[in-house]
Image: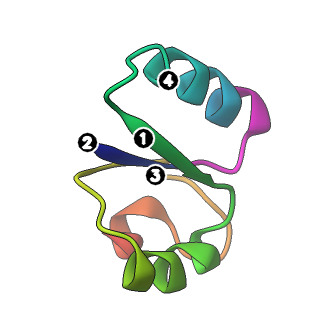
Amino acid sequence: MNILIVDDHPIVLNGTKALLESNDQWRVYTASDSRDVMPFLASEQIDVCLLDVQMPHVNGVQLA
């Protein structure tokens, strides 16, 4: 399963990634800026996306 975490807070981003990577069947990707997500999704197939609702530029609701 491919999981994408999008959050502008490094502690939340890295902590969530560390928790999810404990499952060796999951591949975890991260982005700290919502502007980086759309080009990334054009090249990768993501099964689950965890979005921060309050981010600069584009919020998680708009991004979804």
Neighbourhood count class around disc 2 (C-alpha, 10 Å): few under 14, some 14–19, many 20 upward: few
Q: Residue at x 62, y 76 (%)?
A: 36
Quadrant of the drawing holding the N terminus: top left
Q: CA distance from mark 3 to mark 4?
A: 22 Å
The first of marks 3 and 4 along the sequence is 4
Residue beneath disc 1: 27
User: Does the residue at mark 1 contact the one at mark 2 (Cβ under 8 Å)?
Assistant: yes
**Label 1 element class:** strand
Q: Are marks 3 and 1 in contact (CB under 8 Å)?
A: no
Tag 3, which secondary structure?
Answer: loop
Looking at the image, is mark 2 or mark 3 earlier in the sequence? 2
Viewer-side label of 3, 4: 4
Three-letter amino acid code of the residue under disc 1:
Arg
Q: From the image, state whether disc 3 or disc 1 is nearer to you.
A: 1
Which residue lies under the disc numbered 2? 1
Q: Where residue 53 sits in the image (x, y, percent)?
A: 46, 52
